[in-house]
Image: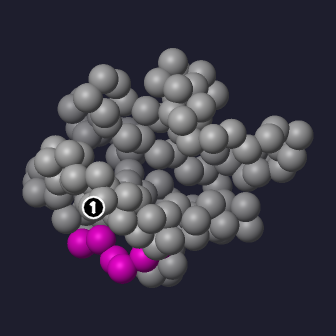
Amino acid sequence: MGRWRPAAGRQRDFAGVWSDNLLARGLSRAFDVPVQAIPGDAGTLLAQATRGSRQLLVLDSLQSPVQYEDADAYRAGLLDLEARWFAPLQKALAAGKIQRLRLEASTAYAALTWDSDRRAQWQLWRRPQPLAATAQVLARGEQ
């Protein structure tokens, strides 16, 4: 949890936190980072956030379907996240409205991380990979 506490004279890692998760909200308040409830979609968040600032968005809506092994709810939740968050954020990244996007997902085995910036959107020579192949690459820590 050291990333939350800014060192003396050092800027915070995030200008704001957007979350309905009680732990994330509590940590934000404890370290004096502004926290807000998650808006309805990425467009609303981008309109409300300060342009050029680092924001942390905690989307944990898939946690319950994973814990209860509810594949149908997981699939529906993933499609909802894709429509309301992932696709619009990727589009904003490609359009230069945001400079960098980092996705992190916890699993039972490891944390998966994916980073992208606007330059990466132009790597047309890379063929899209199936989700299973992408998950394996992320699990190995490759990009």
Q: Which residue is identified by label 1?
A: 73
Q: Is residue 91 magenta?
A: no
Q: Is residue 40 magenta?
A: yes
Q: Quadrant of residue 56?
A: bottom left
- Name the residue: 43% across, 32% down: 112
> Tag 1, which secondary structure?
helix
Crowd around label 1: few <14 · some 14–19 · many ≥20 (10 Å): some
Depth order, front residue of 58/5: 58
Question: Does 27 sit above or below residue 4?
Answer: below
Dominant secondary structure, magenta: loop
Report if residue 126 is visible in the image: yes
Question: Does 118 sit above or below residue 133?
Answer: below
Q: Residue furthest top?
A: 140
Amino acid marked by disc 1: Ala
Question: Does 92 sit above or below residue 140?
Answer: below
Question: Does 134 sit above or below residue 80?
Answer: above
Q: Left or right: where does residue 83 sit relative to residue 69?
A: right
